[in-house]
Structure formats: structure tokens, C-alpha cells
Amino acid sequence: MELISTVVQLRSRQSLEKYPFTGRQVQAWFLREVGRHDPTLANELHQQESESENKKQLLRAYTLSGLYKGPHPVWQLAKGEWCRLRITSLTRELSEFLLNKVLPELLPEARFGQVEFDVQGWTPEPGSDPWSGMETYASLMRQALISKDPRMELDFISPTSFSKNGRFSELERDMPLPIPDMVFGNYLKHWLAFSEVTLPDEIGDFIEDCLVVNEFKIKSERVQFSYQQAQRAATGFTGQVRFAILRNKRFGANWEHYANIVRMLAYYSFYCGTGRQTTVGLGQTRFMNPDR
């Protein structure tokens, strides 16, 4: 299986009144679990993160959520409370490694920051949790052919933003807005990096020319990764955004095919996440169209 999304259930052993956003703690736990079975792979994943922080635009083959209770991030905990985290993988090699090695042999205890948890298991089958799933790149393309609705609604669960360089400066700035070519351009970059299913060269131009925001209900949200270091924070948007694909004569008879590809990329967002820092809990996304 090439694409997986799995949910790990946890039960708190302690209470905590003030919890920072837990994405970085989840990532540290994930790399430790991977390292128990393949230290080289864990080191490679860690090196990718270090290079990314040094502004090299690397795409990672996995995403992680922070800790969640129901639909909301964990900001405080009572002893015995249940919560969950989510792992996705974007390559066959990593997905099979997680399914065959890491997930079946998770240590029964985990620590995220100051709190210890009992690891209660993970969801191996799609459909057992709305945040779990298994797909191939080819199957996403087949599903996109079924729907002809030019509207696509995405739900951005955790704060989402993009990196943008200034016109006269190399300094990167956050762009916490659902700009269509940034959102879908991000999905396209992941697809081209990890999928063997080729896409037309024109699809980037199609996204830029034909994709618009049709309706949205979003808010800005700032997450604090550490209460001791105020600068370790991020600002993004959360909420629902409906995109529409406009007709354009430039693409002629290819318009329908390209529109299917854009729908497919919207489905793909469930696995690849959106924007920056998806390996530490940001950019968690799901497709909301009722016919899927």
C-alpha cells in the first residue's frame, strides 16, 4: 500500500492544566519508534527535518498530528482521559515499514512532554476511524473520475500556512491564507515527488488559471510549541474553504481531464497535509465533499 493514514489511541496517566501544541513531542516519539527498528531510517528522517529548518525546500514522506481529544487539540488533560494522534505515509516503502514493523510493535508506554500515556493501539483498517485510510496513487485518480462537481471543500483542522520569500529579500515569511495556487501547488509538489503516476506538464498552469476560492469560513490561529520559548510558535488558518474550477478556453478539450486531476489532488490532501511543518502537526486537512 502506498498511502496510509492511521490513528494511535492513548490514555493519559497524569493530569496537566496547560499543554503546549504537541506536534514536536509527537514527532520525537515517532522518530524513536522508527529508530527502534531502523536507526538509519530514523536518522535520515531527522536529517531531512534539520535541513528543512535550514530553509532547504525538502518534502517529507510522512505527516504527524499533535495530540487530539475529539476534534480539538489537547490543551489540558485529566488523568485517564483518552486522546489520539495521527500518522500518514506517502511512499510504499515507508508505509509497508510502518504497517509491518513499527505500528504492530509500538511500546505500550509513551511520553509527550511532561505526561506519560498508555498506548492503547492503532487503527489498521480504513473506515474504523474517519482519520484512517489506505490508498494507492492510482486509486485516487480513479475516484476523481467519478465526481463531476467543479466545487471542492477542504477542512483545515490544524493551523495551516505557507512559506513565501519577499520580492526583494530572501527572508521567508508565513502566508496564513488559502491562496489556491499555494494550496494545490503544494499538493502537486508532493505528488510529483512521491508518486509514479505522471501528470501533464500543464497542470500547474491550470491550477493557477482555473482554480478560485468560492466560499470560506476560516479563522487565524496561533500555536505555541513551547511555553518557555515564545518564539517557537506558528500562525496559520483553520476552517473550511470551498474551491471551484472555472472553465477556460485555453485548455480546450483537456479541461475535463485537468479538472479531474485537481479533484484528485484535493483527495490527496488527506494524506500529504497542507503547507509547512506538516511533520509537527500543522496543515492537517480532509476533503469534505458529501459524495465521497
Image: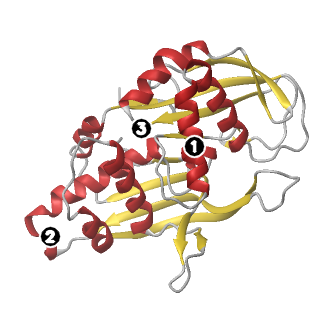
3 and 2 marks in contact (CB < 8 Å): no
For badge 1, the amino acid type reads Gln
Give the left or right position of residue 119, taking residue 143 as reference: right
Along the viewing direction, whichever of 197 and 223 lies nearer the viewer: 197
User: Mark 1 or mark 2, which is nearer the start of the sequence?
Assistant: 1
The Cα atoms of the two marked residues, 2 and 1, are separated by: 41 Å
Which quarter of the picture shows residue 188?
A: bottom left
Q: Is residue 69 visible?
A: no
**Residue shown at the point (60%, 72%) measured from the top left:** 173
Quadrant placement of the C terminus: top left
Residue indicated by mark 1: 47
Q: Nearer the viewer, mark 3 or mark 2?
A: 3
Classed neighbour count for the residue bearing mark 1: other residues with Cα under 10 Å, few (<14), some (14–19), many (≥20): few
Classed neighbour count for the residue bearing mark 3: other residues with Cα under 10 Å, few (<14), some (14–19), many (≥20): many
Q: Which mark is residue 31?
A: none
Along the viewing direction, whichever of 162 and 123 lies nearer the viewer: 162
**Residue shown at the point (79%, 62%) measured from the top left:** 231
Give the left or right position of residue 213, taking residue 80 as reference: left
Q: Is residue 152 above or below residue 7?
A: below
Give the left or right position of residue 180, taking residue 54 as reference: left
